[in-house]
Image (cartoon, grey):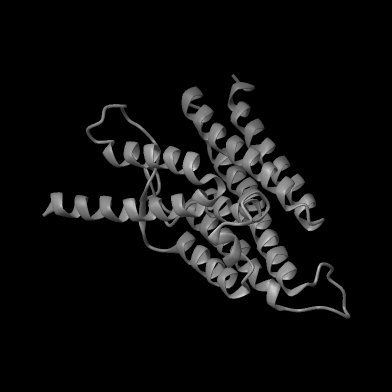
Amino acid sequence: MKFKKHIPNLFTLCNLLSGTIAVIFAVNNELLIAGVFVFIGILFDFFDGFIARILNVQGELGKQLDSLADMVTSGVVPGIVMFKLLQFNLGNFELTRESINYLPFVGLLITLAAGYRLANFNIDTRQTNAFVGIPTPAAALTILSLPLILHFQPESYIAELIHNNWFLIVITLLVSYLMNAELMLFALKFKHYKWKGNEIKYVFIILTLLLLIWLHFVSIPIIITLYVLLSIIENYKKKGRKV
């Protein structure tokens, strides 16, 4: 019994390990490899909660450990990646006293916003079956998709925008805001698998798969935007039903 309650925590620690490895690669300008480890960490993040619910071993330790792991994987890493993207656009590939430019540090707002969002998540009782503001893994995937787009789809219209620092600053501010916005967003948790009552979730899953097949990495920012828009539509529907 004692071992069983630690199984989800092992997955959470794997998330933390993946995030720490991603930090090392991101600092060394290996943004693609960093993205791979962030994705692995997010998978571990999904399964730790899933396993905890199946084994019925949810606890305060797991909750706090999960947020600490997410802070690294979905907070520190995307902040560093945005820092590096801004730095690359300025032509400064190394951080030295002679060539320092403070603009790239704007990217670290993502890390600060993620930290605030995760701390607030732990004390916000509304976020059991829904989210208030976009979850940090979704924000991290949005940021980590940018170097993937540059590498695998350099001819796309978004790739051209990524080379513009003003675009990156707007993305930084927008993602930081959305993580902490008072916006109710649906969670992909199913009490049952019937269509009725899960329409918005199934529509989102189907559109996500189609976009990934059609647009590949370019689809990731679009999917996050779709997630926010569908949540707003769902909120209006719920308000209409209450009236």
Count of residue discs: 0
Q: Split into 4 quadrants, where in the image is the N terminus? A: top right
Image coords of residue 184 (percent x, y):
35, 54
> Residue lying farthest front?
155
Q: Is residue 225 left or right of residue 62?
A: left
50 shown above or below 216: above
Give the residue displayed 73% in from the left and 78% down from the top. Answer: 102
Farthest residue, direction top: 1
Report the residue at 74% width, 67% height from top.
Answer: 88
As displayed, is residue 200 above or below residue 29? Answer: above
Residue 26, x across and y down, in percent: 75, 54
Question: Residue at coordinates 25% horizontally, 30% vertically from top-left?
Answer: 195
x and y percentages locating residue 216 in the rendered image: 54, 44
- Residue 194: give x, y in percent of width and height: 27, 27
- The image quadrant of residue 160 is bottom right
In the image, residue 97 above or below residue 195: below
Quadrant of the drawing holding the C terminus? bottom left
**Residue nearest the viewer, comparing 123 with 151:** 151
